[in-house]
Amino acid sequence: MAAAPPTLDWERELAAQGYLLVAGADEVGRGALAGPVSVGIVIIHASTATELPGVKDSKLLRVPVREALVPAIQDWADASAVGHAEAHEIDSFGIVGALRLAGNRAMEQAAAVLMPDFVILDGNQDWLSVPAQPDLFGEAAAGPPAPWRIQTRIKADMTCLSVAAASVLAKVERDGIMSGLAAQFPAFGWDANMGYGTVAHRAAIAELGPTDHHRKSWRLI
């Protein structure tokens, strides 16, 4: 039985609680060996937004369908953006730090158009908020509070339409980046594997060595 499509049910519940501007956020590329990690952000007026047929978690959509949905999502959203963190930034800051960097790059673009009241993050980890930093006495010193509330939600990309829409934007943009890089580095098959660790991809790394687009701090072989 096919999974039920994502809805605006939770976004509308949030609107009823006073959170009128809701952002859905999702990441793509977390487990890849090469290429950026990318975060999509979609912001909607939760009380007035209408359903957007055909949108699902990006992994459940065929490539032509995903690509065809992008302009519809961009028209449907009140604000949207995709941010990226490159392989060298993943090596420098770790995957969670890189997700935060990509997410805040996306949010900076989207929030310049419309500032959300509430952010729904797919998964069970808040990788968007800036963690508290210890002060001189070792106590956690909170940074300036974000102007929005954040809540994680497992499988939000399957159930929340704003998050599913964000996943499609992030997936299509990141896939486009990897396909472009594949023309420069054809041996790694990035136009097919999108940087993930297939047998052929790992074999090419073993034979040719990693590129500057590989996450060199990871176990690549």
Image: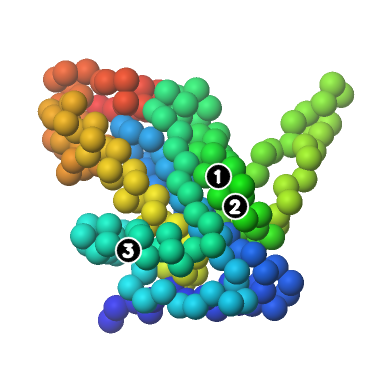
Q: CA distance from mark 3 to mark 1?
A: 21 Å
Residue 127 visible here: no
- Image marks 1 and 2: residues in contact by CB distance under 8 Å: yes
Report the residue marked by disc 1: 109
Q: Looking at the image, is mark 2 or mark 3 nearer the viewer?
A: 2
- Which three-letter amino acid code belongs to the residue tagged 2? Val
Quadrant assignment for the C terminus: top left
Residue 3 visible here: yes
Does 113 sit left or right of 5 as displayed? right
Tell which of 31 and 80 is nearer to you. Answer: 80
Q: Looking at the image, is mark 1 or mark 2 nearer the viewer?
A: 2
Does residue 84 lie above or below 172 as drawn?
above
List x then y, in percent, for residue 206: 18, 22
Does 93 sit left or right of 61 as displayed? right
Q: Which residue is painted at 47% across and 41% down in the image?
A: 83
As helix, strand or loop, the secondary structure at mark 2 comes to: loop
Tell which of 102 and 198 is nearer to you. Answer: 102
Mark number displayed over residue 113 = 2
Does 58 sit left or right of 162 as displayed? left
- Which three-letter amino acid code belongs to the residue tagged 1? Gln
List x then y, in percent, for residue 149: 70, 57
As helix, strand or loop, the secondary structure at mark 3 comes to: helix
Which of the two discs, 3 and 1, labels the residue nearer the N terminus? 3
